[in-house]
Image: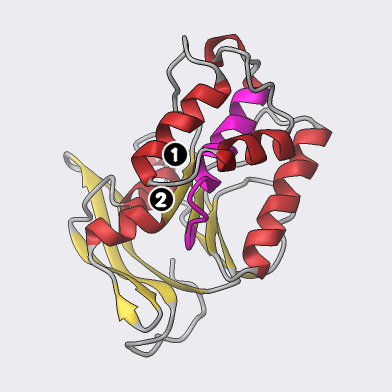
Amino acid sequence: MTAPSGTPSATEDCLDFRGLVRGFGRVPVLAGTSATVRRGELLRVTGANGSGKSTLLRCLAGLLRPQAGTIRLCEDGVELDVAARRRRVGYVAPDLAFYEALSAEENLAFFCRLRGVPTARAGELLALLGVPAVRAAGALSSGMRQRLRWAWALLHRPRLLLLDEPFQNLDAAGESAVRALLEEHLENGMAVVATPTSLELPRLAATIDLTAPAALRGAA
């Protein structure tokens, strides 16, 4: 479960994780997972249901603490601590929810204020992704909610983008819009870790397969 990539130098700008172990109770999920993704690269994570794909992304995002192993994100030659790493992360996941009574624009404006980002950025992303700004988040279709998740993740122009099933529920127009933004951010030096199941991805650096034994599927 290790990507074929050399260990980076201590000051190289990249995401590097080594020997990650994470289980739930007595059920092991990640068992020594390692990989490196550099700026402008995309690391693809594959595996059966329950093999630990979402668990890996949550560990990288700082939402779960691995039971063993190291995660290192370096920026401009400096290794970031966990709090700084969280601030550099953009995260798209199926369980990401919004304030349903607020409009799409109001939701993003709120998070702009929390992150110290100009609120104009919210309108820019909503327009690029074709999300109706004044519609309540609770009234959005599943596809529009997914577009809104992308807008939320990209608000602060993250250095590291973590994508858990990023094209879920998107129609052709929505997929085209998010792919264009993904390409743009990769060209600007963002590192990406993604877990799509079948669709082709741009600028693929490597693939790691987390496929677990049948007895463990469904545990993550």
Give the labeled residue for mark 2.
Answer: 57
The amino acid type, in three-letter code, at marker 2 is Leu
Whether residue 78 is situated above or below residue 127 in the rendered picture? below
On screen, residue 105 versus residue 54, left or right, reads right
Q: Residue at x 62, y 68 (%)?
A: 188
Q: Residue at x 72, y 34 (%)?
A: 127
Q: Main secondary structure of the magenta part?
A: helix
* Quadrant in which the C terminus appears: top left
Give the labeled residue for mark 1.
Answer: 112
Would you say residue 75 sits in the magenta stretch? no
* Residue numbers of the magenta segment: 144-160
Few, some or many residues within 10 Å of mark 1 (<14, 14–19, 20+): some
The single residue placed furthest to the right in the displayed view is 172
Q: Nearer the viewer, residue 16 or 155?
A: 155
Whether residue 117 is situated above or below residue 17 in the rendered picture? above
Q: Whole-percent x and y of residue 63? A: 28, 45
